[in-house]
Image (cartoon, rainbow, N blue to C red):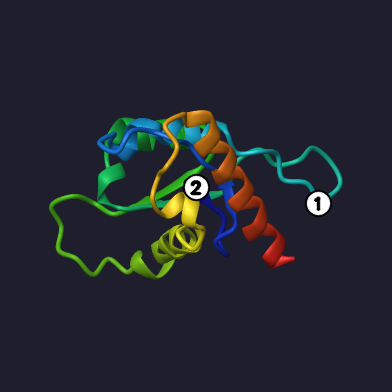
Amino acid sequence: MITEAHGIPLATLLTSANTHDVTQLRALVEAIPAVRGRPGRPRQRPEHLYGDRGYDSEPVRRWLRSLRIRPVLAKRRTPHGSGLGRYRWVVERTLAWLHQFRRLRIRYERRADIHEAFMALACALICWRFL
C-alpha cells in the first residue's frame, strides 16, 4: 500500500504473505493515479517517497531519482532514531483503518479478485470519511 501524507490510500497491491516489500515498489509507484487540481498537466508521481530500511538499496534510489522522486529511506546498518518514524506511521495507521473491516482483518476469500474488491471498497470508504 502507498498513501499520501494524511493516510489516504493512493494505490494497493495484493501479494502473498511472504513477498518482500521492495519487490512491489515499482508496481505501486506506477499504479499511483494522476493528481488533479492545479491547471496544466496533472502531476503523476509524488515529490517524496518515505520508506523504512526494507526499501534501502542503491538501485531503488537510482530508479526513484530517475522518476524525479526524492527518496527519503532509512539506511540499513545505522542506529535507530533517524526521525523518519514521524512520517512512516501514517501507513501503519491506514493499515489499522483497513483492519476495521472484518473481511480484510482475516482473509476468508480464496479468490484474489474478491479480496481485491473488498480492499478497493474499504479504500473508497476511507477516502469518503476524509471528505
Asked if residue 63 is positioned above or below residue 53 in the image, the reply reads: above
The reply to whether residue 49 is visible in this rendering is no
Other residues around mark 1 within 10 Å, as few (<14) / some (14–19) / many (≥20): few
Mark 2 Cα-neighbour bin, 10 Å: few <14, some 14–19, many ≥20: many
Return the residue at label 1.
37
For mark 1, give the secondary structure. Answer: loop
**What's the amino acid at mark 2?**
Ile
39 to 92, vertically: above or below: above
Q: Secondary structure under badge 2? A: strand
Locate the C terminus and report the quarter of the image it occupies: bottom right
Q: In this view, does 8 lie to the left or right of 75?
A: right
The image quarter containing residue 44 is: top right
| Residue at screen point 13% across, 52% down | 77
Which residue sits at x=50%, y=47%? 2
* Residue 8 coordinates in the image, percent (x, y): 59, 57
Label drawn at residue 11: none
Q: What residue type is labelled 1?
A: Gly
Q: Which mark is residue 2?
A: 2
Asked whether the viewer can see residue 12, the reply is yes
Residue 75 at x, y = what percent? 24, 51
Residue 27 image position (x, y, % from top left): 48, 30
